[in-house]
Image (tube, helix red, strand yellow):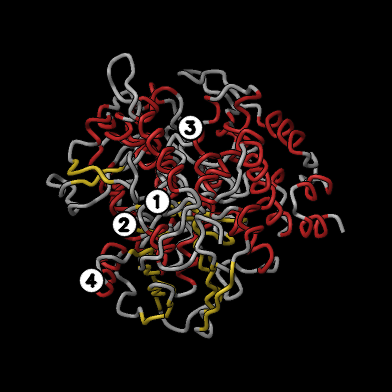
């Protein structure tokens, strides 16, 4: 098998408890790399259209990339894939930690599940041997305890990916957790795992993937580390700030410069949240215990907190909140209490909730409360006013447990608005059912070079509402990078073709990887087209694009021209500007002949 791959995929039928291995051929690997591209290839070929995401015929996959678990820096990522129960579209969620490399060490590049187990189970993969084991004693346990118990039983050299109570109770905004807070967060795939009564996967083994040219990989790694540690004019290493603060470092600034949406996308930071001192980066890391890195990552941008001693008493080991969490539970809710956000983050990680969707849903409920659509009688006596951090934390836990009014909110803003009624959809900011990432596209000027990073990506990506995906040609390299198992924050793009070549033995060029990224974007989109989904028909909440435009602040009088962004990118990719179908010529050129036959019979 080519370097970087184990060369095997495991398929598990939870209905019968049977398993089957299949080999990965080199042509498939080179065309689709891994991650969500290999996942999309498998699901498009094996899962019929119209499948209920929470039903027995749905497929849930855990997929690594060719650089996962290799000496390539930041090669620690894995992706959970399936049809999203939240958006009914293609769904994927990327995560770090150490589980991805350990899945490879256990003997597989990917594992896919179908069916529904009669009772709760977990999958143990130990050095190429897989078995389903009884998880009834783990059902109801949070992710921290689940991980601890399974590692105690199977050894400290095992790694665990699991769901908490929110996934078990099929919350549509639930996620998959490893390493006490490394979340495969978006698309609601924790609900798919819960619907299958699959509590966890445990991976252990020593089957390190081979490397085609170890000397070349070692040389590239030294060059990468030297670049990473270059000093600027002030004598600081380029990555020093990111190591210290992670993505939390710009939270206060973004809350006021127009990057972070404020007050459920309806406010202005400098007006509605003038005091952001609680979100300042040193405040966010004030209770830091130690820096934490994903598997063999030289950056180590994450942080583990000490025990909370003040009003919010979280246990030691709670992950420091990252930017998206600080924004969704912070500026979006008009809250600047860093410890309250740390507590909400801990609740989400323990119960397995996507922090972006959870914070957005809390902000939505606050606006409903402000406008009299819900009252204290509805909200279990909790006063859901803007900036009320105590109410925010309390309701997050209720949402995680599906208790009281939390059950109304547990499936995200779209479903909550339907349950509340009374015109609540006016305040439900989402696209296609998924709450948006915490970056306001109006901050991006509508120039060609920024088209993939602006409003169009929220509407048009195969997983709507995603801040981490690109739409159009400028997003292609990012797709390839993610499918290979690398971290988007690793500054790996200049080294990417060389690392992939040295690990796999292929002669990879930038042009080939751009082509691969285009194939990834097209295949994920084709999955949705086969489901009858045209992204042009997704409603875009007017606040997202500035209709009407804000009258004060850094985004005053700015409206994002989403129509122009979409129009330009559709043309650039040779997708029809009405149906969004890729042309037959394009599909064949990308090697997607079966998709061409389906879309152009």
Confirm or deny contact between disc 1 and disc 2 (CB under 8 A): yes
- Mark number for residue 266? 3
Left-right relation of 418 to 181: right
Q: CA distance from mark 2 to mark 4?
A: 14 Å
Q: Is residue 460 visible?
A: no
Q: CA distance from mark 3 to mark 1?
A: 33 Å
As drawn, the residue found furthest toward the left would be 309
- Mark number for residue 152? 4
The local secondary structure at tag 4 comes to: helix
Tell me the residue at 52%/52% (across/down).
417
Q: CA distance from mark 2 to mark 3?
A: 35 Å
The local secondary structure at tag 3 comes to: loop
- Mark number for residue 96? 1
Q: From the top left corner, tell me how far across and down residue 511 is, in percent.
A: 66, 37
Tell me the residue at 45%/62% (across/down).
190
Between label 4 and label 3, give the one nearer the viewer. Answer: 4
| Circle 2 residue | 179
Q: Which image quadrant is residue 599 in? A: bottom right
Between label 3 and label 1, give the one nearer the viewer. Answer: 1
Earlier in the chain: of badge 2 and badge 3, it is 2
Q: From the top left corner, tell me how far across and down residue 381 is, in percent.
A: 30, 54
Q: CA distance from mark 4 to mark 1?
A: 22 Å
Residue density around tag 1, few if under 14, some if 14–19, many if 20 or more, within 10 Å: many
Earlier in the chain: of badge 1 and badge 2, it is 1
Between label 2 and label 3, give the one nearer the viewer. Answer: 2
Position of the N terminus by quadrant: bottom right
Q: CA distance from mark 4 to mark 3?
A: 48 Å
Residue density around tag 4, few if under 14, some if 14–19, many if 20 or more, within 10 Å: few
Earlier in the chain: of badge 3 and badge 1, it is 1
């Amino acid at each position: 098998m080519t370097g970087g791959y184990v060369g095997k995929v495991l398929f598990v039928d939870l209905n019968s408890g049977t398993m089957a291995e299949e080999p990965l051929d080199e042509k498939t690997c080179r065309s689709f790399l891994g991650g969500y591209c290999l996942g999309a290839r498998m699901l498009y070929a094996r899962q019929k259209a119209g499948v209920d995401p929470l039903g027995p015929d749905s497929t849930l996959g855990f997929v690594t990339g060719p650089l996962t678990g290799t000496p390539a820096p930041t090669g620690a990522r894995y992706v959970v894939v399936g049809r999203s129960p939240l958006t009914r579209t293609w769904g994927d969620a990327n995560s770090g930690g150490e589980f991805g490399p350990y899945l490879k060490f256990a003997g597989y590049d990917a594992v896919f599940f179908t069916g529904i187990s009669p009772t709760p189970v977990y999958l143990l993969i130990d050095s190429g041997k897989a078995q389903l084991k009884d998880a009834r004693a783990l059902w109801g346990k949070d992710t921290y305890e689940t991980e601890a118990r399974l590692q105690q039983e199977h050894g400290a050299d095992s790694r665990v990916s699991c769901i908490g109570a929110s996934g078990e109770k099929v919350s549509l905004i639930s996620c998959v957790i490893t390493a006490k807070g490394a979340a495969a967060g978006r698309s609601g795939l924790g609900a798919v795992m819960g619907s299958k009564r699959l509590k966890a996967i445990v991976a252990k083994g020593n089957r390190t993937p081979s490397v085609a040219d170890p000397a070349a990989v070692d040389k590239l790694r030294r060059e990468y580390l030297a670049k990473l540690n270059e000093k600027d004019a002030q004598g600081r290493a380029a990555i020093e700030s990111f190591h210290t603060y992670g993505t939390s470092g710009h939270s206060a600034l973004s809350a006021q410069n127009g990057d972070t949406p404020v007050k459920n996308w309806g406010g202005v930071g400098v007006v509605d949240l003038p005091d952001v001192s609680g979100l300042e980066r040193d405040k966010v890391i004030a209770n830091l215990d130690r820096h934490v890195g994903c598997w063999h990552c030289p950056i180590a941008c994450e942080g583990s907190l000490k025990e909370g001693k003040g009003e919010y008493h979280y246990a030691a080991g709670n992950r420091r909140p990252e930017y998206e969490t600080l924004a969704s539970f912070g500026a979006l809710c008009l809250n600047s209490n860093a410890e309250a956000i740390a507590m909400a983050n801990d609740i989400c990680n323990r119960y397995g909730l996507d922090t972006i969707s959870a914070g957005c849903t809390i902000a939505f409920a606050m606006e409903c409360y402000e406008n009299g659509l819900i009252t204290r009688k509805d909200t279990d006596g909790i006063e859901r006013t803007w900036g009320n951090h105590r109410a925010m934390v309390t309701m997050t836990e209720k949402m995680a447990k599906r208790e009281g009014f939390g059950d109304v909110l547990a499936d995200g803003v779209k479903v909550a608005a339907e349950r509340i009624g009374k015109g609540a959809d006016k305040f439900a900011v989402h696209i296609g059912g998924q709450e948006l990432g915490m970056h306001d596209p109006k901050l991006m000027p509508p120039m060609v070079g920024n088209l993939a990073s602006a409003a169009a990506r929220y509407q048009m990506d195969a997983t709507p509402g995603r801040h981490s995906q690109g739409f159009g040609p400028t997003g292609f390299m990012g797709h390839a990078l993610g499918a290979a198992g690398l971290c988007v924050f690793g500054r790996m793009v200049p080294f990417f073709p060389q690392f992939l070549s040295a690990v796999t033995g292929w002669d990879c060029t930038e042009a080939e990887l751009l082509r691969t990224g285009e194939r990834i974007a097209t295949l994920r989109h084709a999955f949705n087209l086969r489901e009858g989904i045209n992204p042009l028909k997704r409603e875009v909440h007017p606040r997202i694009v500035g209709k009407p435009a804000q009258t004060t602040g850094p985004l005053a009088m700015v409206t994002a021209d989403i129509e122009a962004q979409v129009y330009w990118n559709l043309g650039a990719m040779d997708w029809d500007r009405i149906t969004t179908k890729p042309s037959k010529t394009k599909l064949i050129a990308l090697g997607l002949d079966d998709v061409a036959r389906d879309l152009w019979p």
